[in-house]
Amino acid sequence: FLFDLLDNKIASYGLIIFLLTIIIKLVFFPLTYKSYLSQAKMRVLKPQIDEINKKYPKKED
């Protein structure tokens, strides 16, 4: 649908594909950004988590 809409306005398929790529990246940016923040927080907390896991090892049942 979006490809056909852009095809009527823009003659170059390369430019259409480029614009669609940018649009898709903009749509998914909030999810990507939240994922990046979550990974950064986990990287900061990892030493503390490892220390807690070492202090209280898992008990296998």
Image (tube, helix red, strand yellow):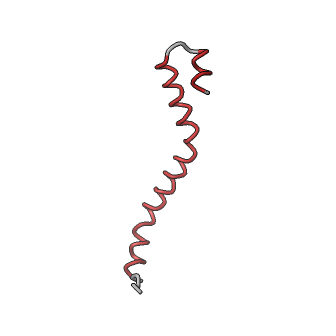
Q: Position of residue 36 (x, y in %)?
A: 49, 51
Residue nearer the viewer, 18 or 51: 18
Q: Is residue 16 left or right of residue 56?
A: right
The quadrant where residue 51 appears: bottom left
Up the image or down, 46 lies above or below 23; here it is below
Residue at the top extreme of this rendering: 11
Q: Position of residue 12 (x, y in %)?
A: 50, 15
The quadrant where residue 2 appears: top right
Total count of labels:
0
Q: Residue at x 57, y 24 (%)?
A: 3
Q: Residue at x 54, y 35 (%)?
A: 24
Q: Residue at x 55, y 42 (%)?
A: 29
Q: Which quarter of the rendering shows the N terminus?
A: top right
Q: Residue at x 52, y 31 (%)?
A: 22
Residue at the left extreme of this rendering: 54
Q: Is residue 60 left or right of residue 27?
A: left
Q: Position of residue 9 (x, y in %)?
A: 61, 15
Q: Which quarter of the rendering shows the C terminus?
A: bottom left
Q: Position of residue 46 (x, y in %)?
A: 42, 66
